[in-house]
Amino acid sequence: MTTEATLISGDALKAAALKFLSEMRDKVEREQNGLHSIFDSWFTRVLTRLIAFDPSRSWEDSVRENAARPPAQDLSLQWDLMRLRLFLDRWVQGHLVEYSERERSGVHYHPRFGTEFGLDVLLTCQGAPSLMRWRGTPLMKNVFDFAMYPALIAELRPQTIFEIGSGLGASAVWFADNLALSGIQGQVHSVDRVKVEMEYPHVKFYQGDCSAPERLFDSDLLHSEPHPWLVVEDAHHNVIGVLEQFHPVLSPGDYLVVEDSDVKRQAIRDFVGAHPGEYLVDTRFTDNFGRNATCAADSIFVRTATRRSETPIDRAG
Ligand SMILES: C[S@@+](CC[C@H](N)C(=O)[O-])C[C@H]1O[C@@H](n2cnc3c(N)ncnc32)[C@H](O)[C@@H]1O
């Protein structure tokens, strides 16, 4: 792990690009019946152009020189190369990444959110002026998370979802509907300072205050509900206290999502710092629509089986 974040370049960039291209081609045949996504097409097109440059030189040098040469028709290739480098820099890290490493490599992105896009998208992606709704009730998820959570639920197949911060109850209902869509007989437990008065199959709402995290959920419940769990912190109060409360009852493979994490970074740093190697960011979910295209920037964690000093789990992706 480096202390300074340097973006992939030179021969390492070329090797990563060719490796990714080969895996991408396999995926296109295996999963997409030969059909290319927008990203697949773009990647192939850019790589075809880069490979045509003098192989003894780095792509960075060739593209820089090419852009300076009149007529300046190839400025877009500079943009393409930067996108390619950012993407491959993430890809070579594998899909499970330490939080500290994510923060370090975040310097290449939006200074506060670590996203590939800007505040403009973040301002409106929950809906503006109106929130999205689920079964008629306003839902405080953004469009990226609206696509991310179903994928996470379909893969994790959580038997239990704990939500801290029910809002109007729409997210708990949406989680339950997603469990059902994936054919999972799971249960959602959702707590808020103000209890949601709603009845819905497989959802239980509770009253609780994050100021007293030990009383958010009954201890018997926390020791009896089946795993895997998906725990979603979305109350924004006493975050470290809430995360520490869950830590002893989380099992390897459980997922912990801290929403709106741009304002919770110190709490997250303290939490993962207190449990080295036990929580890794799953970048398949934070980055699938672009780096940190989620309100849970760098904070979709999988609870690992090991501590840092022991054998690490699969980091190859
Ligand atoms: C962002 S909203 C939750 C939105 C909901 N999860 C959704 O996606 O639609 C945050 C919720 O946290 C609750 N909250 C704030 N402070 C709290 C505390 N100290 N204890 C429990 N809940 C709290 C608020 O009442 C509010 O409903």
Image (tube, rainbow, N blue to C red):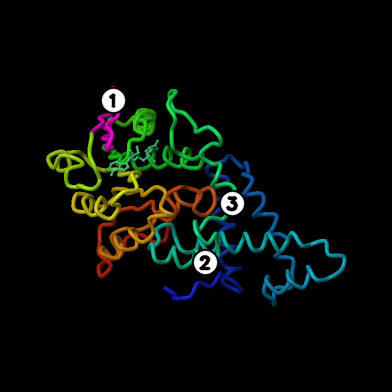
Q: Amino acid at mark 3?
A: Arg
User: Residue 126, relative to residue 10: is it above or below?
Assistant: above
Q: Residue furthest left?
A: 220
Q: Which residue is mark 1?
A: 197
Q: Nearer the viewer, mark 1 or mark 3?
A: 1
Magenta stretch contains residue 18:
no
Q: Which residue is mark 3?
A: 25
**Residue in the image at 46% along x and 68% along y:** 104
The tag earlier along the polypeptide, 1 or 3, is 3
Q: Amino acid at mark 1?
A: Glu
**Residue in the image at 44% along x and 37% along y:** 140
Q: Amino acid at mark 2?
A: Val
The front one of 279 and 197 is 197
User: Residue 296, relative to residue 61: is it above or below?
Assistant: above
Magenta residues, start to end: 186-206
Mark 1 crowd level (few <14, some 14–19, many ≥20, 10 Å Cα): few
Mark 3 crowd level (few <14, some 14–19, many ≥20, 10 Å Cα): some
Q: Which residue is mark 2?
A: 107
Q: Position of residue 202 (x, y in %)?
A: 27, 27
Q: Position of residue 219 (x, y in %)?
A: 13, 42
Label 2 with label 3: CB-CB less than 8 Å:
no
